[in-house]
Image (tube, coloured by chain):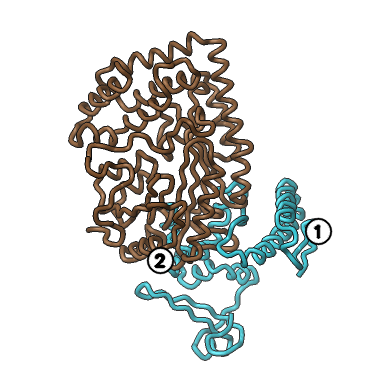
Chain colours: A brown, B cyan
Amino acid sequence: MKDESAGDAGRQLPFRHADDPTKVRSLGPWLDPAAPDGDVVISSRVRIARNLSGFPFPKRASDPQRHEVIESVRRAPWPEEIASGLIWVGMRDSSPHERELLVERHLISRQFAQSDTPRAVAVSSDESLSVMVNEEDHMRVQVLLPGFRLGEAFDRVELLEGAIEEHLDLAFSSRWGYLTACPTNLGCGIRLSVMLHLPALRITNEIERVRRAAKDLHLAVRGFYGEGSESAGDFYQVSNQVTLGVSERELLEEFCQRIVPEVVEYERSSRSLLAERNSVLLDDRVFRALGILRSARMLGLEESMKLLSRLRMGSCLGRLDAVPIETVNRLFLMVQPAHLRTVAGLELDDDQLREARGTMVRKVLGG
Amino acid sequence: MKCDHCDKPAVVHEVVIKDGQKTEVHLCEAHASAAGYVPQPQPLNQLLSSISPANQIVRKSGASPTCPACGMTLAQFRQHGNLGCETCYETFEGVLESLIERAHAGGTHHIGRSPSGAARATELRELRMKLVRELDEAVAAEQYERAARLRDRLHGLGERDEGEADGSASPDQAPGQVNE
């Protein structure tokens, strides 16, 4: 069955080439290495969960109700300055491959990609905004920006919210705030998160201290693809868990003034210490990784993420002039299965995919 | 709440769900009697607990609480961890209170943005009064850590929204002195 309510005939996701299906924009805008604190903070994300009053939450709703929710959200006056070129995609209209591309670009969740109920996503032309409709909640609005730009992402979400609230009647209680399908998300219903690259803290085993401190502060630490994913490539996504009894501004202050700067400083000082006291070990890790990436004939996803992480650290510390950080960032995205299949062929099996990954990485790194 | 048939306060409340349609009946003593409802004596604690809608529904159906709006049962919620609709929060309020407090590191009330700016002042007033009551309880129960947290939150509210509240409980008030 088609999602008539959300599908746009001829719609083209912003990162895909209009005429050539084997091309895909190779750098997610959130992978910009020139972004503020980009050596450690890969991206900043602010996400709000909101539900429409008068409709059961998505899992409990009927298909007609789900379609009605999609239509209501779609008709909301999304402000053009943030939601420029907003493209709506009905998930039932999109192929599994296309959904996987959206997951890899952090525009939808894996759970959302795999569900088969009526649901839709809107993506802005610069991919900084996405609106998932009928995931766990009716609306999951996210702004994702490169580097440490949490404050800016927050301001954009606030502006969006102000505009949509005029149009939509939201489920809200004066005691429990914005009501969500899972009680762990209610209250201000906001999730602030930063994706951090912490290779030095991993090498020095200090990462466990970060994990413990995060736990004490009621923060969740997850991997590259959020909930349930491992910290492949030394990427850690840190986000708030508490959303009730604390305002969104307090959370933002805590993240911007305290949490993020402290972890960034910790990682930087660990990198410097490694470079000063253990430069041979550091260079060995970096150049061994480069050697494998330039020579391997078959590369698994996890292995390539791990090796690319070391390259990225070497590049950030100025020990690897041959490979600019932008190239490494691009590779992080291009080694992902759906991105790789776009370029190398949709029909590839797992072994062929590993071979294609090895070939692509060798080519990019001049192996 | 008023009686469905006159202006007297309703003493009998009934929620009937048939074929997914929810119907509510609210009757005063006279109309309830006329409609054949027989009042039953209840001990005070049961009466107090019946204020919660969740408990009302338990009592009426005699079974596991069921949300009158979406049909979600408490057992289903416990199994999946997700609620069915906004009304579930009222239906299962008694069960959710402690669970939510644990999940949110002691957070019991919403602070921050609300859909309408106009409603905010009222909410803050309500929140302050609630916190003052809780502080009073905490002190009486000698739960000093909890009391200190509540006091800090009251101070926080006072600073954040100075000038917005009028006639509300002052954050500097001693516990128990709630302006009515």
How packed mark 1 is, by other alpha carbons closer than 10 Å (few <14, some 14-19, many 20 or more), is few
Relative to A219, is B4 above or below? below
Residue A88, quarter of the rendered image: bottom left
Q: Residue B173 carries which label?
A: 1
Residue A345, position in %: x, y? 20, 34
Residue A331, quarter of the rendered image: top left
Q: Residue A172 carries which label?
A: none
The amino acid on which the numbered mark 2 sits, given as a three-letter code, is Gly
Which residue: 35% across, 43% down? Answer: A110
Query: Which of marks 2 and 1 precedes in the sequence?
Result: 2
Could you tell me how many numbered marks the image carries?
Answer: 2
Tell whether B23 sits left or right of B175: left
Numbered disc 1: what chain? B
Numbered disc 2: what chain? B
Q: Residue B71 carries which label?
A: 2
Residue A194, position in %: x, y? 51, 37
Residue A251, position in %: x, y? 60, 45
Of A230 and A26, nearer the camera is A26
Residue A307, position in %: x, y? 38, 21
Of tags 1 and 2, which is closer to the observer? 1
Of B133 and A325, nearer the camera is A325
